[in-house]
Structure formats: C-alpha cells, structure tokens
Image: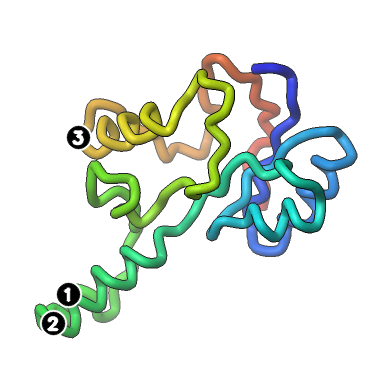
Amino acid sequence: ADGTEIVFACGGGIWASAAEAAKKAGGKVIGVDTDQSAVIDGQYGEGITITSAMKGLYPTTVDTLTNVVINGKWADYAGKVDTLGLVSADPAANYVQLAGTTHFEDGKFTAEDYANLVKDMYEGKVTVSNDISAEPATTNVNVAWLGNLK
C-alpha cells in the first residue's frame, strides 16, 4: 500500500461524512450499494472514489422476477429472507459486485484479476469468512480495526 487512507462508506448516508474525511486527509473513498463515483467525485473531487461495493440490483431483480413470474416459483421466495451474493463466475451476473468505474490503474490488481478472483470464489477455490467476532487477517494492507460498531 502507498499509505493512502481509504474510507469504506458503508451504511446509507454515511458516505457524505466518509467523503468529507477522505477529502480532508487526502484519502480515497469506497462507496456502497450503487456506483457512487459520480455523486462523491462530483461533490468532493474527481477521482476520490476508487470503487463502490455494489448490490447487483439488475441481476437480482431480473432473476427473482423471472423465477416468480415466468417460472412460477413464488413458494421459493414467499416469507423467506435470503443472503444474496455470488451466483456466477461472471462478476456482472452476481448480486454483489464492484462498480464498472473501479480504478485499477496501479496495475497491481487489474480488472482481469478481479474477474479471476470472483471466478475462484464462485468455484470455492477462495473462501471469504463471515466471522465478525475477530479482526480479519490481512496481507499487503494495514487495517485499522475498530471492532464491531453498533
């Protein structure tokens, strides 16, 4: 890492505070939910948003409506809560994704690397822990662990 402070603006409208802090510190922002680069860069400076961790609203909506309306699978969805994530080795088909405006400019991690990582996760070659009880192990980055904020 080059020492740049990166703020993950998770949690609804918190992006404004995260973007303000990143601008003051000369840092960068990771948006959330949708591609927020136009809004954040437009208000806080071009290039401040390096990516957005997005909900894949298009594939989620199309797949669900296709299954319910066309395939008649309402019972698969009625009254259920689902954790949506990877459903394909293709990043664009998944229910979580990175924004198409992601900056891969340093050459250390490319769009092709991202596509290969998604494929490996989908195929089970790489796993991601959902354990939130302890600080995650990291390599090549320093993480300021703040614990579980509630």
**Residue 44 rendering spot, x and y as whole percentages:** 81, 51
Q: Which of 7 and 34 is in front in this view?
A: 34
**Which numbered disc, 3 or 2, marks the residue that appears first in the sequence?**
2
| Residue of label 3 | 123
Q: How crowded is mark 3: few (under 14 residues within 10 Å), some or many (20 or more)?
A: few
Task: Quote the CA–CA distance across marks 3 and 1.
Answer: 23 Å
Tell me what residue is drawn at x 70 percent, y 17 percent: 2
> Disc 1 designates what residue?
67
Q: In this view, does 10 lie to the left or right of 118?
A: right
**Residue type, mark 3 in image:** Glu
Q: Do the residues labelled 2 and 1 touch (CB within 8 Å)?
A: yes
**SS at badge 2:** helix
Where's residue 35, x and y in %?
56, 56
In the picture shown, does residue 137 fall above or below 47?
above
Q: Which mark is drawn over residue 70?
A: 2
**Crowding at label 1, few (<14), some or many (≥20) Cα neighbours within 10 Å?**
some
| Mark 3 touches mark 1? (CB < 8 Å) | no
| Residue 58, placed above or below residue 138 | below
Quarter residue 26 falls in: top right
Residue at position x 54%, y 59% from top?
A: 34
Q: Distance between the residues labelled 3 and 2?
A: 28 Å
- The Cα–Cα distance between marks 2 and 1, rounded to whole angstroms, is 6 Å
**Image spot of residue 141 (x, y percent):** 60, 19
Task: Name the amino acid type tagged 1.
Answer: Asn
